Image (cartoon, rainbow, N blue to C red):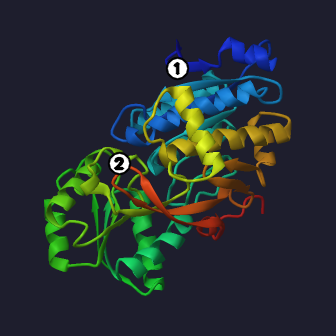
Amino acid sequence: MKAASGALAYASAPSILATAGIAQEKPIVIGNILDQTGGLNIYSLQQIKTTAMAVDEINAAGGVVGRPLELVFYDSQSNNQLNAQYMTEALVRDEAVVVHGGVTSSAREVMRPIVSKFGGLYFYNSMYEGGVCDPRHVCPAMVPSQQLKPLVPHVVQNMGKRAYVLGADYLYPHTMGEWIKRYTEEAGGEVIQTEFFPLDVSNFASAITRIQAEKPDVVWSVLVGNAHNAFYRQYEATVGKDTIPLASCMFGIGREQTYLSADESAGIVNATSFHDGLETEAARVFLKNFRAYTGDESYVGDYGELGYRGVKLWALAAEKAGDPSADAVIEALPGTSFDAPGGKVTIDGQTNHAVMDIHLIRANREQGWDHLGTTEQLEPVDTQAVCSLGS
């Protein structure tokens, strides 16, 4: 990567472009805005690498419409002012035809109006609360109905009916808390308490005391970011998962199980669109290629795969359109499908979200996950209920 007017520009090696026969063609610029530094960077570090890997793979296969891709990367530092600034720079100064990036919903929402203003295209490769209905916004990641439909019934049936929910204090965890309550009640259980905490909180002693007093059957974590990792350590040192088990729709997304001890993480259940223990040929090839490409033997995880699938889906739509411009790709997106490492992913034309497989998992003592089952080809029904693009 080389410095380029405040950003980092990445171009595939000349040998790759020469072998593919596209070395002399004008590059297509794609943007990438992610938190390489900052309090939420645990969700971005592997995605930054897999995005670059996808670009190299596409270039090695002949690029897009016979032209090489060039990646322009910005470190948003978990700072929404920088998200807004860099989205403008990517679209206006660097003339990116598409921008991939953003971690939180607040990051997305400061960038989306800028994308609309300049007629761009934005891939938000991050799980979120659902409901965005915008032809210039594409989300190939999970929304609540996809993740919770298989997860909540498993929790109610195998862990207990009385649930206590802890979440980070911003839009996504608040919305997930509402969905957990809805699906828990549909499964015959109840949520007895829900609490939210600022992202910088790292002391959960008072919340743990309340959990001990309430004696729920299961505790749900929708906690987010580096500071909130302290909860899992404090919980295991006091209550313990053997006494009251933990379920989560966030744990592991930031590779938390690789930072915590086996005692602190083993047994937590979640559902995801990809995990490194997935025993499919596509997953094995993806992980083998990632390790060869980066030299990184560590856990890749869901967010790493999401960046990869987002770039691949965009490239397939651009090839289908025969034109990488934003408006042409938007027209071509409905029905675009990719056999991703986590399973087949297809863009739903009604919402610009994705149909995908969801995998039920449980953290093990080897910093990975045991696979408990797969629910195939779940549609984003919560977003479909409020969105009908083109109608």
Q: Please, what secondary structure does the residue beneath circle 2 have? A: helix
Instruction: Residue 143: name its quadrant.
Output: bottom right
Q: Which of the pair 234/335 is nearer the observer?
A: 234
Q: Position of residue 388 (x, y in %)?
A: 71, 64
Q: Residues within 10 Å of mark 2 (few under 14, many from 20)?
A: some
Q: Position of residue 379 (x, y in %)?
A: 65, 66
- On screen, residue 41 versus residue 64, left or right, reads left
Query: Residue drawn at (79%, 20%), measured in percent from left and top?
Result: 20
The answer to whether residue 88 shows anywhere in this view is: no
Q: Amino acid at mark 1?
A: Leu
Q: Please, what secondary structure does the residue beneath circle 1 have? A: strand
Q: Position of residue 375 (x, y in %)?
A: 60, 68
Q: Position of residue 149 (x, y in %)?
A: 53, 72
CA gap, disc 2 and disc 1? 28 Å
According to the picture, the residue beneath numbered tag 2 turns out to be 256
Considering only order in the chain, which callout, 1 or 2, is on the residue closer to the N terminus? 1
Q: Amino acid at mark 2?
A: Glu
Numbered tag placed on residue 124 in the rendering: none
